[in-house]
């Protein structure tokens, strides 16, 4: 198992940013802050954890909102993630209508919810479906991508200034309106475009694109990627030239849109990713070529400095692939935020892994009652699985602010149940992703060990709270745990359907180990409130977390016998 280690970071410097706002503003503008590779999303001047709920794509109209808020409330989400489409705010060129945005803001404030708004414009999953009619029906003015065989795809090319200018003008108008009407800072982040890239071709092969493709690769990109050789894209990047070229131009396009918006209202801005499979990626064009897929992250970091983070959309159900994606997108130059994840039961447990990576938040997709399901990527019915996220958010909601602060200041770890089982499905998948017989349960498959330095935490699944029965997993797989180091030998621990057992590492060899104290409690306005001490049966067999929420603060100790 991979060890997840984060370095301790003081928060004082980040908090100073809260004062750097205009005097007329009621609250500070949300900011993404970083220190030594650790990140926090600052909202109202303090770290914020997004417990998100994203609507279906076409729920972005006032008439649909009565079917949105009940799902948000039932989940106990603190943030609604919802699109704002170019076609709805600029139906006629140069004439803007932000009435939906105003309605949304009013209703969110009435429910004490924050918003992350998704700008659906030039790209929404490859195509311009959410662009205005006057854009998507004028291929002369706003050209599409042309394949190497001369076929026109329904994907706008990033190489034409007229398209960029039109998108940028609308986005700037949108951000100007937000600045004017949202002094309460209800909106905390903005996503620029949606799952950018092109299916069906590695890049644009139009005459204009071909001319650009023959030009020298920009010095900035060569320097940032450590390429010593100069020349055309084909000369510098060889077989990867087409995809790299497309990624550079899409990223530059998106960055220019974001930079123009930030110039009027500097909210944190991000892009989301239609992922390629990290273990079996296929060829560019089979997945969304030009997007910030794992192989193109360095290109995007070079081309799009005004994009604050790259956020994966996870629809891989299996543990091995989902957690590998998190490893790839949790970087010193990129905080992890799960911008979308499937809303079916197997995805819920990845919340713990997200927090273990110091994640800014977690947002299941399709959480409304508009009678739409993206099964098999998600659940067949929203109500079928909403409880799986409610239990997570009810556990972390009362301490969301405190967890965000702890995660920014201290090392954190998080894991979820690694064997994939879904209800009556009898197939199991071991740690290597291969199929195994459901009757052959190896306790090691349900055991994870986390190196905490002086201590080791063993996390196991499917055990009774009393006695030493070996782990055999939950059915369906649903357990997980998080640990935060508060001080030397002191940890905050919580989880669901799991056992966490602490033992000394080799660094404490020759010393006796004891659990000094285990407190159950909760946070109230940032302060720990003691409820009771766990001891005896509650600690002799490890710390057992059931389906009911428990938050523990533990103190470990060692001593010499001579």
Image (cartoon, helix red, strand yellow):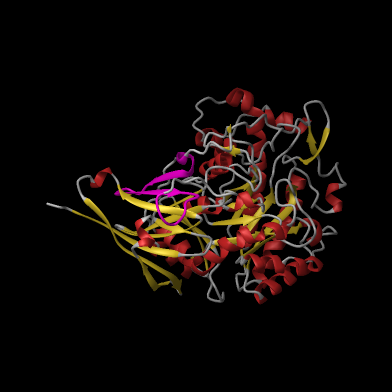
- Residue 344 visible in the current orientation: yes
Which residue is depicted at the point 70% across and 65% down?
71
Magenta run includes residue 458:
yes
Q: Which residues are magenta?
A: 443-468
The quadrant holding residue 152 is top right
Please tell me which residue lies in front, 95 or 276.
276
Q: As drawn, which residue projects farthest toward the left?
A: 562
Q: Position of residue 44 (x, y in %)?
A: 52, 70
Q: Is residue 305 left or right of residue 95?
A: left
Q: Position of residue 20 (x, y in %)?
A: 48, 68
Q: Position of residue 550 (x, y in %)?
A: 47, 65
Please tell me which residue lies in front, 156 or 47.
47
The quadrant holding residue 516 is bottom left
- Residue 55 visible in the current orientation: no
Please tell me which residue lies in front, 523 or 326.
523
Which residue is depicted at the point 56% across and 48% down?
305
Which residue is depicted at the point 79% across and 55% down?
372
Please tell me which residue lies in front, 422 or 189.
422
In the rendered image, which quarter contains the N terminus? top left
Magenta run includes residue 60:
no
Which residue is depicted at the point 67% across and 53% down?
343
Give the answer, above or below, for where 177 lies relative to 302: below
Q: Is residue 252 left or right of residue 551?
A: right
Give the answer, above or below, for where 430 lies relative to 96: above
The total number of labels drawn is 0
Q: Position of residue 135 (x, y in %)?
A: 83, 49
């Amino acid at each position: 198992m991979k060890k997840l280690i984060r370095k301790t970071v003081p928060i004082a410097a980040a908090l100073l940013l809260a004062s750097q706002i205009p005097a007329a503003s009621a609250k500070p503008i949300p900011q993404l802050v970083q220190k030594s590779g650790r990140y926090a999303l600052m909202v109202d001047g303090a770290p914020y954890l997004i417990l998100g709920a994203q609507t279906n794509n076409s729920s972005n109209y006032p008439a649909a909102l009565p079917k949105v808020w009940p799902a948000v409330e039932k989940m106990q989400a603190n943030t609604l993630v919802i699109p704002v489409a170019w076609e709805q705010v600029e139906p006629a060129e140069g004439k803007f209508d932000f009435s939906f945005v105003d309605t949304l803001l009013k209703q969110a404030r009435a429910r004490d919810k924050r918003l992350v708004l998704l700008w659906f414009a030039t790209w929404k999953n490859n195509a311009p479906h959410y662009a205005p009619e006057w854009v998507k029906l004028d291929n002369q003015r706003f050209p599409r991508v042309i394949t190497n065989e001369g076929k026109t795809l329904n994907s706008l090319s990033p190489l034409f200034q007229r398209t960029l200018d039109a998108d940028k003008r609308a986005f700037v108008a949108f951000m100007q309106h937000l600045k004017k009407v949202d002094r309460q800072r209800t909106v905390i982040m903005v996503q620029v475009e949606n799952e950018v890239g092109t299916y069906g071709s590695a890049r644009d092969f139009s005459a204009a694109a071909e001319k650009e493709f023959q030009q020298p690769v920009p010095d900035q990109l060569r320097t940032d990627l450590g390429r010593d050789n100069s020349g055309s894209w084909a000369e510098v990047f060889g077989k990867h030239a087409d995809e790299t070229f497309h990624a550079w131009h899409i990223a530059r396009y998106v960055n220019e849109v974001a930079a123009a918006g930030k110039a009027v209202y500097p909210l944190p801005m991000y892009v989301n990713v239609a992922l390629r499979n990290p273990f079996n990626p296929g060829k560019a064009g089979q997945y969304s070529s030009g997007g910030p897929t794992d192989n193109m992250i360095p290109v995007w970091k070079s081309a799009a400095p005004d994009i604050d983070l790259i956020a994966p959309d996870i629809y891989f159900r299996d543990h091995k692939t989902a957690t590998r994606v998190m490893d790839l997108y949790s970087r010193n130059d990129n905080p992890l935020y799960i911008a979308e994840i499937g809303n079916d039961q197997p995805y819920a447990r990845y919340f713990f892994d997200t927090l273990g990576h110091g994640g800014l938040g977690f947002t299941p997709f399709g959480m409304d009652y508009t009678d739409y399901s993206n099964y098999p990527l998600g659940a067949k019915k929203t109500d079928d699985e909403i409880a799986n996220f409610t239990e997570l958010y009810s556990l972390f909601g009362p301490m969301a602010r405190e967890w965000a602060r702890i995660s920014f200041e201290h090392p954190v770890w998080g894991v979820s149940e690694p064997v994939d089982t879904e209800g009556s499905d009898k197939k199991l998948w071991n740690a290597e992703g291969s199929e195994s017989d459901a009757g052959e349960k190896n306790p090691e498959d349900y055991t994870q060990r986390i190196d905490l330095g002086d201590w080791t935490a063993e996390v196991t699944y499917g055990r009774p709270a009393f006695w030493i029965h070996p782990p055999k997993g939950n059915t369906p797989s649903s357990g997980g745990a998080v640990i935060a180091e508060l001080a030397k030998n002191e940890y905050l621990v919580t989880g669901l359907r799991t056992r966490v057992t602490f033992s000394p590492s080799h660094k404490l060899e020759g010393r006796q180990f004891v659990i000094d104290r285990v407190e159950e409690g909760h946070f109230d306005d940032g302060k720990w409130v003691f409820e009771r001490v766990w001891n005896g049966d509650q600690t002799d067999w490890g710390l057992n977390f059931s389906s009911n929420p428990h938050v523990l603060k533990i103190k470990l100790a060692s001593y010499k016998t001579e």
